[in-house]
């Protein structure tokens, strides 16, 4: 998400921070590079023009160029203006009904049905009792898809026989949600390949029946500036309260996410990332601005850890690591915990100062390196995982054969793990390790 833009802006920010004195010429060069970076990311031209003008006005207007740490202050201005462009504050869902109704609308293929299930998972984590309602009566297998997703996430799905009008499904779903004590009803509606009058009229009638607390427009972020046009068309007919931008993990530019708030006035509520049922992020403008500028997003990282990691197991692993009792069995367990947290590139990108490593980390996963490590460890006996020092030549050949890897790859893993154990032994003993022989070897440098 925003890899190219983030790399460009992080580089510009780094150069600005490193300057003890900045001239207006330096500022003009930096702003020109920022403008080009945003335009290449497919951000709306007018939004970019206004953004650059505001940054320049603030930087020159309060005479920052001649103050202390001018580079850092200009970076702060860029950060603050990015936050403002993204909407300023987090759009929290207004769930005041009994039950509250969240109406999901959008074009066909934007990801409404999957988003409905993801949102159910998100709401349940927040203490709500959601129910899904399948009111997409036009797309083949749409109801079956939602039922399958509901079974997968453990959320009840309300359906009606084939041929039942969408308005009747919405009405009966609301009645059932009320009777069964569900406090949020998520209504999945039909999409179209293009915006048409009949579809809009049906959505308006559905909204009139269920009176939604929130009407979320689901938009495919990979459509670029077309997403802005779609949002404007829907908002002209429906009281859209927020946006969900899907497929953000597949969009290298992400300009729609940066300019859709400024061009439509509609707040972004969530970002959809990946096919996993937990692949839905609450949209925090300040956190995203930090991530784009290469500052990391430690709050989102901590939340991801809290949601997916077994705390007791993690504490035991940390204790064993510091006591130099960390085994390959522990290592495999930690790999499984990390996998639960989502794409590794996203996680690394959230760590301050590590944004430029996100692409390499994800590439290591995509190229199968992580899978090979798991296969090698899984091909060991429990005793070998606990005591890797017993793995001699014949065992290494057997492990390589069982994991579908080479003996060299088994040797490399064991060597790197041995280096890590040596490093932690030195740390626990109060000694400062040589980075080249410890951490460098662990990462194969």
Image (cartoon, grey):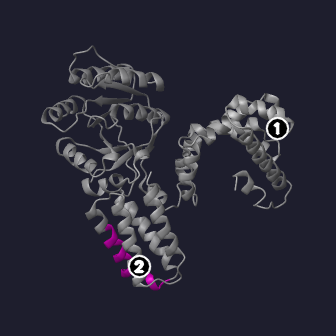
Which residue position is annotated with label 2? 27
- Where residue 370 sits in the image (x, y, percent)? 63, 41
Q: Residues within 10 Å of mark 2 (few under 14, many from 20)?
A: some
Query: Separation of disc 2 and disc 1 at Cα?
Result: 56 Å
Question: Image quarter for residue 64?
Answer: bottom left
What residue did someone put label 1 on?
A: 388
Looking at the rendering, the stretch of residues picked out in magenta corresponds to: 51-67
Position of 335 with respect to 101 (left or right) is right
Helix or strand or loop: what does disc 2 sit on?
helix
Whether residue 325 is situated above or below residue 151 in the rendered picture: below
Residue 7 visible to the viewer: yes
The residue shown at (48%, 36%) is 278
Q: Nearer the viewer, residue 377 or 81?
A: 377
Residue 154, position as x, y percentages in the image? 47, 23
Our reading of the magenta stretch's main secondary structure is: helix
What crowding class fits label 1: few (fewer than 14 Cα within 10 Å), some (14-19), or many (20 or more)? Answer: some
Q: Residue 47: name its quadrant.
A: bottom left
Vertical arrangement, residue 84 with respect to residue 204, above or below: below
238 lies left or right of 301: left
Q: Is residue 89 magenta-colored?
A: no
Q: Which residue is found at the position 78% from the left and 58% from the top? A: 437
Where residue 113 appears, x then y in whole percent?
35, 31
Image quarter in which the C terminus is found? bottom right
Q: Nearer the viewer, residue 63 or 252?
A: 252
Expressed as whole percent of the image width and height from the top left, the position of residue 164 reads: 22, 17
141 left or right of 230 in image = right
Q: Residue at x 44, y 45 (%)?
A: 249
């Amino acid at each position: 998400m925003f890899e190219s833009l983030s790399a460009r802006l992080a580089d510009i920010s780094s150069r600005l921070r490193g300057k003890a004195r900045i001239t207006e010429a330096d500022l003009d060069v930096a702003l020109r590079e920022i403008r080009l970076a945003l335009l290449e990311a497919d951000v709306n031209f007018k939004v970019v023009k206004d953004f650059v003008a505001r940054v320049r006005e603030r930087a020159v207007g309060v005479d920052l160029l001649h103050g202390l740490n001018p580079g850092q202050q200009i970076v702060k201005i860029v950060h603050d203006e990015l936050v403002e462009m993204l909407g300023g504050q987090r759009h929290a869902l207004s769930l005041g009904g009994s039950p509250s109704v969240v109406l999901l609308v959008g074009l066909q293929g934007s990801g409404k049905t999957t988003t409905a299930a993801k949102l159910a998972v998100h709401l349940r984590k927040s203490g709500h009792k959601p129910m899904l309602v399948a009111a997409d009566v036009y797309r083949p297998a749409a109801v079956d898809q939602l039922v399958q997703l509901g079974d997968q996430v453990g959320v009840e799905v309300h359906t009606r026989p084939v041929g039942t009008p969408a308005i009747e499904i919405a009405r009966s779903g609301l009645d059932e949600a009320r009777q069964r004590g569900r406090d949020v009803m998520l209504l999945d509606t039909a999409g179209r390949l293009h915006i048409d009058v009949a579809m809009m009229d049906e959505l308006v009638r559905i909204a009139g029946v269920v009176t939604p607390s929130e009407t979320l427009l689901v938009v495919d972020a990979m459509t670029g500036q077309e997403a802005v046009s779609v949002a404007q068309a829907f908002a002209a007919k429906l009281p859209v309260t927020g946006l969900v931008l899907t497929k953000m993990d597949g969009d290298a530019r992400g300009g729609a996410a940066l300019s859709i708030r400024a061009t439509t006035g509609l707040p972004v509520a969530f970002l959809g990332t990946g096919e996993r049922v937990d692949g839905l992020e609450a949209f925090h403008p300040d956190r995203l601005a930090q991530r784009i500028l290469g500052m990391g997003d430690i709050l989102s990282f901590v939340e991801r850890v809290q949601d997916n990691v077994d705390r007791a197991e993690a504490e035991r692993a940390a204790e064993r690591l510091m006591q130099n009792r960390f085994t390959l069995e522990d290592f495999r367990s930690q790999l499984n915990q990390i996998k639960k947290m989502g794409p590794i590139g996203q996680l690394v990108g959230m760590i301050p100062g590590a944004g430029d490593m996100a692409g390499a980390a994800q590439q290591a996963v995509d190229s199968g390196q992580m899978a090979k490590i798991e296969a090698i460890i899984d091909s060991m006996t429990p005793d070998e995982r606990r005591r890797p020092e017993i793995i001699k030549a014949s065992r290494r050949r057997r492990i390589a054969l069982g994991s579908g890897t080479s003996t060299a790859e088994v040797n490399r893993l064991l060597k790197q793990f041995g280096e890590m154990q040596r490093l932690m032994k030195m740390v626990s003993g109060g000694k400062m390790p040589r980075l080249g022989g410890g951490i460098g070897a662990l990462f194969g440098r």
